Amino acid sequence: MPESTLKQTLKQKIDAFRPRTQRLNKDFAEVVIDKVTIGQAIGGARDVHCLVTDISYLDPQEGIRFRGRTIPETFAALPKVPGGEQPYVEGFFYFLLTGDIPTPQQAEEVAAEWRARGALPPYVLNVLRALAPDTHPMTMLSAGVLAMQRESVFARRYGEGTLKKNDQWDPMYEDAMTLAARLPALAASIYRMKYKGGSFITPSPDLDWGGNFARMMGIARPYDEVMRMYFILHSDHESGNVSAHATHLVASTLSDAYYSLSAGLNGLAGPLHGLANQEVLAWIHHVLQKMEGRLPTAEQLKQFLWETLNAGQVVPGYGHAVLRKTDPRFTALNEFARKHMPKDPLFQFVNLMYEVAPTVLTQHGKTKNPWPNVDAHSGVIQVHYGVTEEDFYTVLFGVGRALGVLANIVWDRGLGYALERPKSVTIEMLEKWASEGGRKA
Ligand code: AMX
């Protein structure tokens, strides 16, 4: 395959960045940028500044910026798929990797490359078929990704013993491109296998990645538009979240993209992370069942929220480890729903929750952020367009998240980031330092 504009541009960017990280590491390694507290050591390393990525940055008040651009700025700048309002996901991936807004031709070039690389090998379907029928779709996604590891260009070239450190990004890029290209077919095959009796739909040579995903799911327009937006919104949230961090951590051992993404997806499958979108729908259904199908009033909804909190459970879709305001991804989905499905009863439920839950969570007094995250909204849009199988929702998150974490591990290898290995201490040490008012140097 001839070297594409994307790959050439990426190579120039990595070469230009590499001396900057090398200089920081060599001349400024002792500069103190953060003090780790006992609370951070036992509290999940919150706010410890020890990961580096230029692909996105999450501000607690403002939310995510991709390559310096807010969500609305990103969507406005990217080239749109002809006949629609949403950008090419392929163009967005180009932007994540390089920081440059691609031309429509460059986005189409990636689209053509992903179509060429995108066929799902039949052995992957055999692996999925061998799993027990009640296997969760996230397990199927992770297993499907892992099954393809045998094709890793990175693993093969590393094994040949001739791969220089500065060249490691190249086979990582090749694996990332193949994996990204195949994810729509993998996810749609899981959906069709699990919920539609295993009747698969082939992709079209005329469609982009988002369009082909909708086609292979068997869902008519405007689901393609919904999913382009959805995948972009879920792609990246800087590198400290569990799915991004797990992918980066595993890749830091020079594991290839297949091993690394599979690990990240396993992290995404937790209810405090990506599974929350499934949990939100389950919670909404629980309330509607109790209400015999009627929408609750604000007062009734408050009671349901308190029941959940008093039972010691979290309200899914609310709170965030970094954000301290409404998640702009929630806002983007809300604006889309307001335009395209304003009368949908579940959309009205989401809006009622938005009115009521922050007050209840504030009164409850535990969470540092009573505002909704992306998962509070994403599922009801899926229901509206016919994807009612809520245990599939995290797979959709995973396909989107893959774009961000794959872009990150290509750059990890480009800049030669080190094997990740934080230091652990014992409780006894912490108690000693606590009694001495801190650790003496
Ligand atoms: N409902 C009830 N309690 C909540 C809460 C919520 N939505 N969010 C946080 N809390 C509680 C925590 O459980 C914690 O209680 P504890 O002291 O008894 O352990 C306390 O408030 C302080 O937590 P925090 O510092 O505000 O949040 P965190 O960084 O520890 O956790 C998160 C962040 C997202 C896991 C948490 O807000 C949560 O569990 N939310 C519900 C699940 C959810 O929506 N997850 C999706 C997040 C976005 C994503 O990754 N997809």
Image (cartoon, rainbow, N blue to C red):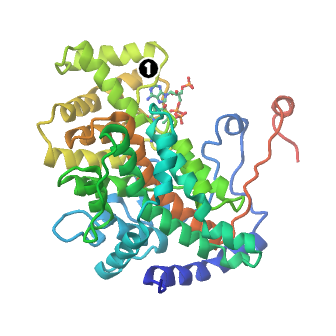
Amino acid type, residue under disc 1 in the picture = His
Residue at 49% across / 53% down in the picture?
Answer: 124
Vertical comparison of 346 with 11: above or below: above
Whether the residue under disc 1 has CB within 8 Å of ligand 1 = yes
Depth check: give the residue in front, 110 or 368.
Answer: 110
> Is residue 61 at all visible to an observer of this figure?
yes
Q: Position of residue 395 (x, y in %)?
A: 42, 45
Vertical comparison of 259 with 360: above or below: below
Depth check: give the residue in front, 234 or 126.
Answer: 126
Circle count: 1
Residue at 51% across / 50% down in the picture?
Answer: 144
Q: Position of residue 256 (x, y in %)?
A: 63, 62
Vertical comparison of 391 with 48: above or below: above
Residue at 72% across / 77% down in the picture?
Answer: 163
Left or right of 316? Residue 344 is left
Residue at 66% across / 78% down in the picture?
Answer: 167
Depth check: give the residue in front, 246 or 184.
Answer: 184
Q: Position of residue 403 (x, y in %)?
A: 46, 60
Vertical comparison of 245 with 20: above or below: above
> Is residue 101 at all visible to an observer of this figure?
no
